[in-house]
Amino acid sequence: MKRNKMKTKLLLTLFASLLLAGCWPFDDAETSSSEQTAEAVVENLVITTTEDGTVEAEEKVLITNELKWSVIIKSVVEEGTVVEKGDLIIEFECKNLEDAIDQKELHLNNAELGLEQAKKDLVIAQKQHAINLEQAKNALQDAQENLTLYQDQSQSNLAQAEELVRQAKEALERYKSKGGQKENSLRNADIAITMARKTLKIEQERLAFKKKVNEDPKLNEPYSKSEIETAELNVETLKNNLEDNIAAKELLIKYDIPQVIRQREEAVTQAETDLKILKTHTIVQTMRQKETAVKESQLNLERAELAQEAELKWKEQEIKGKEKELQEHQDQMAELKEDEEKLRVTAEKAGLVLYTPGWKGEGLRIMIKEGESVYPRAQLLQIPDMTTLRVKTMLFEALREYVTIEGGQGEGAVVVAEIEAYIEAALKDLITKVATGVLPREKFGAEALKIKTDGFIPKIKQAVIDGRMTKDEARRFYDRLQQQEVEIASQTGGTPNLIEINWDELPDGSKTRKTAAEPEADQQATQAVLVLDAFAQKTQVSGRVVESSPLPKSTGPEWLQTGTKAYDLYVGIDWEANGLTPGKEVRPGMGGKVTLLLDEIENALTIPVLSVYNKKNRYYCMKLQNGTPTETEITLGKMNESRVQVLSGLNEGDKVLLVAKSEEGIESERAADEGDASAEGDVGEGT
């Protein structure tokens, strides 16, 4: 079988490093005799590696507690039961789920009532706003009519004020003009004075006549004393009346006439002032008020229209919110009902039930039995797809180059694994820093975003630029990462920091590199031989390597830190060729040994591995020449677990010591043997 030089060099280097490090597992019992020999023979050297393997299904249905609450196992089928599609496998009870459904029904009813009330409120608001709009329109119409009426009334008021001014001026002029009230008042006063004087004169003449008559003795005083006194009194009264009339005229001239004139002038002034105020203030101010009232009414109308629009939109939005709230409760109820259905788990298809319980803390596994409490997401059972059974084993990193995967394994998968490993390691380190207080908790989001922008996004771009991934492969991988981020954010209540990559700036070329993981067209998958412990006769089962993990991982626990890494390797079984039936002779969980056929060298000259030793970076064996061990330098080729290829230094049929020792070692051994014999002789003689 054809193999490249790199594989040969790697095996040779591994073998040399083992010898130089002094790590080869010599057994004292095997080296106790220098007489054991082996012969150099020509044979087909088969190079293999053997590791433990376990049968498992590539595809399987895992049965877990899919609820977010703890549940109690109500019933479960026995392990190993073969079930048909639709058969009940496990049934749970969950008091929290029952309470949540009852509570959600209450919320659902409240949401339905709230939505109904919101719709009624919308109808009432529409009617109320129609009334408000009508009132606002009427108020605007009233204000406009008041403005128009006042415009007409102001003209009338102005005319009336002007008429009052005219009348006041006329009254003043009429009072002061010739023949007016002023002259009439003076003339009446003069007439009164004249009449008073004439009357006084007449009465004085009568009094004088009466007195003169009484003085005539002949007449014998015809007028009595009382008549004379009465006449005198009348005269005195008329004198007073005359004086009063004169005084009244003087008062009229001095006071009354000026007062009336002044009053008439003040009336004119007041009328003119009123007219001026009416023109410049009252009408203007009232008109402004009326116009302002119209504007306010218009504003009130617009406000009412806007308020109606805003409130109706708010009511409509409230209805949408209530509808959304109702829908959310309905969706949540549907989810709860789905969770309720998850309390009864039935088989999706026929298969074998296996118990694979998870942990419940404190190093205790969950007991798969009735009445056991199970935490959320805890794994309980699995039903493997028997048609996908294969054997999982391991392959040390140094041997990965020698294994060919069926169908090949592209570099894109390796890149994906590298980036996923980087993300896992970076986030694990970040979480550790936060947990230990090295990084403040509030900076976690920024640092996580930095890992994204400065870490794996550049790695994805570089993989495309290097040709290790196509742009389509990179885009699909990144879209999957983004979707996972959205799902994690929705579960935790966080906000995803989605970043779009400018794919146009990356090259469109396909992958150009070819790695050892990608087989040549004429290469076949590496063959394997399985020996399962369950087979009493240790029957060998043939298979082939069908898959390998993209990246190796450390073997053993993390605290050990051996530095040894190995790939997960999966071996497929040719069922028909081996005469086996999946799930019948071979079942999940069976263990055994997996031997990989890495290489085969035809007509190779070989000797046992234990015949070889190293000295000063050269390889030697003890060749028997005439029965004497002679140190012989040899050149090595490939090896398997027991024999090694000799390229030069030996011929077919040569004898070599099976347990190799250098000449110095042989001499030392001989000296030791002689010393032991001498000591035994001394002891014998002494006895």
Image (spheres, rainbow, N blue to C red):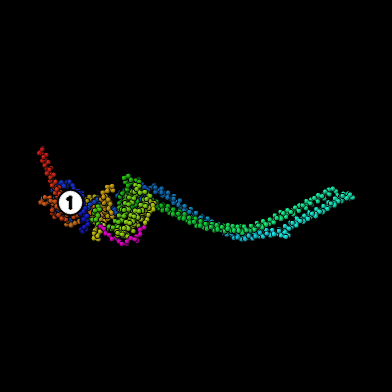
Can residue 153 be spotted in the picture? Answer: no
Residue with the mark numbered 1 = 616
Does 509 appear in magenta?
yes
Q: Residues within 10 Å of mark 1 (few under 14, many from 20)?
A: few
Q: Position of residue 616 (x, y in %)?
A: 17, 51
Q: Nearer the viewer, residue 74 or 236?
A: 236
**For the point 48% across and 53% down, which residue is it?**
117
Can residue 478 be spotted in the picture? Answer: yes
**For the point 45% across and 51% down, which residue is it?**
110
The range drawn in magenta is 500-516
Q: Position of residue 574 (x, y in %)?
A: 25, 56
**For the point 17% across and 46% down, which residue is it?**
28
- In the picture, measured across the screen, residue 628 lies left or right of residue 143, that is left
Identified by mark 1, the residue type is Lys
**For the point 68% across and 59% down, which residue is it?**
169
Residue that extends furthest to the right in the rendered view of this protein: 218
Q: Secondary structure at mark 1?
A: loop
- In the picture, measured across the screen, residue 499 lies left or right of residue 175, that is left
Q: Nearer the viewer, residue 583 or 415?
A: 415
Q: Position of residue 581 (x, y in %)?
A: 26, 54
Q: Position of residue 228 (x, y in %)?
A: 84, 49
Q: Nearer the viewer, residue 72 or 187?
A: 187
Per the picture, the main secondary structure of the magenta-coloured stretch is loop
Picture quarter with the N terminus: bottom left
Picture quarter with the C terminus: top left
Residue 363: name its quadrant. Answer: top left
Does 146 appear in magenta?
no
Residue that extends furthest to the top in the rendered view of this protein: 687
